[in-house]
Image (tube, coloured by chain):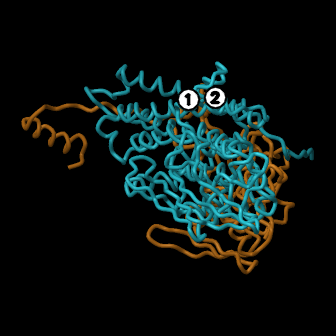
Amino acid sequence: MKIAVAIKRVPDMDTRFKIAPSGTAVDETGLKFDMSDFDGYAAEAALQINEKQGGGEITAISLGPDVVQETLRKALSMGLDKAVQLKADAVPFDGYAIAEALAAELKGGSYDLILFGRMAIDSSNQSVGPMVAELLGLPCISAVSQLDVSDGKTVKARRELEGAYEEVTCPLPAVVTIDEGVARPRYPSLKGIMAAKKKPLEVKPAQLGPVTATVAKMELPPERAAGRILGENADAVPELVRLLQTEAKVL
Amino acid sequence: MATDLATDTFLASPALRPREDDLYGIDAALTEEERAIRDNVRRWVDEKVLPIIGQHYLDGTFPKHLIAEMGELGFFGPSLPEEYGCAGLSNVAYGIIMQELERGDSGLRSAASVQGSLVMYPIYAFGSEAQKRHWLPKMAKGEVIGCFGLTEPDYGSNPAGMITRARKQADGSWVINGAKMWITNGSNAQVAVIWAKTEDGDEAGHSIRGFLVPTDATGFAAKDQKGKLSLRASDTSELVLADVHVPADAILPDSKGLKSPLMCLTQARYGISWGVLGAAMACYEEARSYAKTRVMFGKPIGGFQIQQVRLADMLTEITKGQLLALHLGRMKDAGTFTPQMVSLAKRNNVNIATECARETRRLLGGNGILAEYAAMRHMANLESVYTYEGTHDVHSLILGQAITGLNAFG
């Protein structure tokens, strides 16, 4: 099956973020970057589909400056077959601008299946996948936790709901966004890492759509206020109970 | 549309900026591939090793279930050529893998060191083409585990005095007798590289040669050494060879004299000089995190000068050790390294790692003695690493001889 997987390079979330002097972006100094978690699940889902079917080709696509090549090579080291970088100076906030660039690249590729992560773990927009589907005139199923395309004609997808799940089907070709649950992304083997540099990585200028939505301001949550000591012994209890009732309203 | 192919081009690492735990920006001195390998092994150790290793240490068991996966991911003999089923990585990449494995546990790294540097390497360096084709691909996958028998109960730092003998029979086959001790992987191995003195009348007369001995051969016995208070998550065995009969083609044809096993040890010691940095880093990270969160006298203990000195010393020594290991690795890749350089790196890095573990144990106070934390496990492990693969003292004498030209051995 011919599959495309869209991949975003995001900061490692296990860190204390600072805001850049511009006030509209994260300060990238000292951050470590990796593939967005859900995109890793999407790459793994694509690999498993083609391993089950015994053939096919998987293309990783990422939009951004040259540093995204590192993330693309990680996808190649997992076993994806080739990669395309849609080169842009920066990744705009506006998902539509990105979706247009991706759709322009995907349009001519005659892909059977186009996979996205459910969302990018840094921007949490959940918008690019469905927008690409719309631009390509393809059906879209979002936040899929199990995926079956074994008949080569239809997608059978499972979506987790609050306390339940639903099964959704649509014909191929289709766009599917992947939630966790499909399968944990594999560890690239050392041979896979070595092989990645021999796989094709094509660089094309991104044909970004118009950017209309931008970040006006970014702020960190306020520091937690310091605690208060009401007293040292049993005498403090009535006041504590009163404050828990009236001020904290937890009793 | 303008299109160009980025195949075989790599991002310039210097674009990376120093991080909190990488004060000297050593990341920037690694290639993208080396960083990818490090991050990959690190994730594997975080997910598969750290959650279970404390219990294995307490139980005194080697986590055998990890072997197949380690093989699949390519951790065994990663710098040997691809034609033998290995990954063909650089020596720096090999060092990085050892570092990350030892960040988990010295026992795990020891198992990989022995498999790669002490068994696969001599087969590759001294073996016949048939031996290489037979053993290396299976060993790379972890389907066959090997051990290395050089040290004997009475001959540790002085292997030249070994008692084990291989006697050539009329039909060209060999009969081996002797005992080996402190053999990592010994009871878990399917094949042993046994070093023995021959009396085959070659030019050298009594010559030390290597033999590939299947561990199911009649007369071969491996018994785990009990009562270890260090490297508890690793199998250490005693081997006994009583009239073990092996065919003529069991000998490693290009092994010639004591130099051959010493070449293997140089490989393994190189890996150790990287590996122990992983243990030191694990301890430093544990110490830093504990110092920031443990409150005593109303503030985090990291706010006290005495703990800051500890942390400053650790970071300084780790950074120096990393620069030493990386430079050594680059020289090994360039083919310009010497065994004396490896002695210096092994001696220094194991020593500073041992100190880091001990200081972390102390910084953690009472909690530092618990298996829940890594410090004391690493501390106890590193006492073995300090002693094996050329003791700290033997490396001092190697350096002393290099400096003065005078031999202080014996």
Mark 1 and mark 2, same subunit?
yes
Look at the picture and state if B367 lies above or below A194. above
Give residue B127's position: percent from left, percent from top: 76, 56
Q: What mark, if any, has residue B324 been given in the picture?
A: 2
Of the residues shown, which amino acid type is indicated by label 1?
Asn
* Chain in orange on the image: A
Q: Is residue B28 above or below residue A124?
A: above
Instruction: Please name whichever residue, B305 or B207, is drawn nearer the observer in this view of the structure.
Output: B207
Tell me the quadrant of the picture where the C terminus of chain B can be found.
top right
Could you give the CA–CA distance between mark 1 and mark 2, rounded to whole angstroms? 9 Å
Q: Position of residue B151 (x, y in %)?
A: 56, 48
Closest to the observer, B174 or B22:
B174
Mark 2, Cα crowd under 10 Å, few <14 / some 14-19 / many 20+, is: many
The local crowd at label 1, few if under 14, some if 14 to 19, many if 20 or more residues have their Cα within 10 Å, is: many
Where does the image place residue B347, in percent across and percent down from the top left? 56, 31
Along the line of sight, the residue nearer the viewer: A126 or B340 = B340
- The residue lying at 81 percent from left, 58 percent from top is B83
For label 1, the residue is B348
